[in-house]
Amino acid sequence: MSYKVVKFGGSSLADANQFRKVAAIIKSDDKRRFVVPSAPGKRFSDDIKVTDMLYKCCELAGSGVDFSDDLQLIKNRYNGIISELGMDMSLDEEFDTIERELKARPAKDYAASRGEFLNGKVLARFLGFNFVDAADVIVFNTKGSLLLEETVKAARERLKGLENAVIPGFYGRTTEGVIKTFSRGGSDVTGSIIANAVRAEIYENWTDVSGFLVADPRIVDKPDVIETITYRELRELAYMGASVLHEDAIFPVRSAGIPINIRNTNAPEDAGTMIVSNDHDFSRESLGHTITGIAGKKGFSSINIEKAMMNNEHGFGMKVLKVLYDNGLSFEHMPSGIDTMSITLETARLEPVRDKVIAELRREVEPDHIDVEDGLAILAVVGRRMKNTRGTVARVFAAMAHARINVKLIDQGSSELNVIIGVSENDLPEAIRRIYDMFINSEKQ
Ligand code: ADP
Ligand code: ASP
Ligand code: MG
């Protein structure tokens, strides 16, 4: 029999009522046997995620400040869920251990991981499923990188013969036995790994929206749901800040040919978004829009270098890149002209070495002029159909021109899967709305 791996995000497990919805979803399909939960998330918009509460406890513990009140608030959240579900279960022992550990060794990853650990225990008991600690199956090296092969082997071994299991998301352990988490939102990655390990027929990722949307719903009002998206398109969008799925959640299932289905815990009747590989048969798909999705993120700077005839100067680009390399900087884009070259990179990475980098560039390439522009946003318009459609870039520009938004950079990857533009941070939401109008609303008319 083949199985479905189901991952539920924080908002899907934020309170007892959400737990009931999750149990109903799992019980409605006998193939849903392996469950990966996140920690309880927000119940309302200014609520605090359990993960953030745990980070706070750890910070207090690290400064030698009493954190018992903060830990009690976390305990109250779990106890609220347990009692409302009418369960007979105590987490006292677990909380004593957490308090003791944090006092002795306030480690951030350990603290954060307890949100998923405890939620996994509660969910396993509620469902009547086995509990498998992620620390036993997810393995990192001592530098904190996931060891995928070892992990899949360990997970396969541990889950073999189990009829069902709840495996908490977000964390594992290093080869030295220290608890380690993925970056934020990392339960998606755990789900993907478990799907690979049990050779699932599908990886269902249950969240609070009815699929991957064409644009961020906080920017565009009620954006369309993307029916089918390829892993490559999704990676471009996820990298650009469409945060519905952690970007590292793609590799483990992609290599195994397992599709991901993004679903809504609050609307389980909706089909959601299917994420498939490039060689998926799209022939039966209703002809969609030219573009698949739009996403953007803020926080970029551009180093602008001007020098007459730089294109004739042998090794100019190499010298510039060497300065970046020597300072541990990677860059996102490098648009250039005959006398100008710009390098777009993350402001937060540039900041600590900004003056040094500029001084070194001055010395190495002796520019006529050099400056840094901050406050840039990068926006990606992504779509597998763009390759076969003429005029996409022109339409992006037209949308920007109508809105009087100044385009500061443009780049198109050789795969013609995306068009990247740079705009001022203040213009980002409007730019996204205008592109949405241009490609989605107007194509509907
Ligand atoms: P979970 O806690 O279930 O993992 P996340 O908060 O990580 O959920 O991801 C879902 C959220 O991602 C949505 O509530 C939405 O606000 C946000 N989001 C941003 N961009 C998109 C997009 N293009 N499509 C869908 N959701 C998006
Ligand atoms: N609970 C973790 C976070 O808030 C991991 C996750 O939700 O996937 O980032
Ligand atoms: Mg998430």
Image: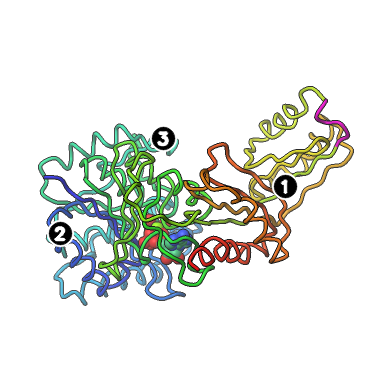
Mark 2, Cα crowd under 10 Å, few <14 / some 14-19 / many 20+, is few
The type of residue carrying mark 3 is Thr
**CA separation, marks 2 and 3?**
39 Å
Does the numbered disc 2 mark a residue whose Cβ is under 8 Å from ligand 1? no
User: Is residue 250 located in the magenta-colored stretch of the structure?
Assistant: no
* Residue occupying the point 43% across, 61% down: 213
Q: Along the horizontal axis of the image, is 222 left or right of 360?
A: left
- Work out which quarter of the rendered image holds the N terminus and state it: top left
Q: Quadrant of residue 99?
A: bottom left
In x, y percent, where is residue 113? 35, 53
Q: Is residue 57 visible?
A: no
Relative depth, front residue between 207 and 176? 207
Q: Along the horizontal axis of the image, is 127 left or right of 229?
A: left
**CA separation, marks 3 and 1?**
35 Å
Q: Earlier in the sequence, mark 2 or mark 3?
A: 2
Tag count in the figure?
3
Q: Which residue is mark 3?
A: 142
Q: Along the horizontal axis of the image, is 134 left or right of 336?
A: left
The type of residue carrying mark 1 is Ser
Q: Which residue is mark 1?
A: 302
Q: Nearer the viewer, mark 3 or mark 1?
A: 1
In x, y percent, where is residue 57? 43, 62
* Local secondary structure at mark 2: loop
Q: Which residue is mark 2?
A: 29
Does the numbered disc 1 mark a residue whose Cβ is under 8 Å from ligand 1? no
Would you say the residues marked 2 and 1 are in contact, meaning their CB atoms lie under 8 Å apart?
Answer: no
* Magenta residues (range): 307-312
Q: Is residue 120 above or below residue 430?
A: above
Relative depth, front residue between 214 and 204? 214
User: Is residue 311 located in the magenta-colored stretch of the structure?
Assistant: yes
Quadrant location of ligand 3? bottom left
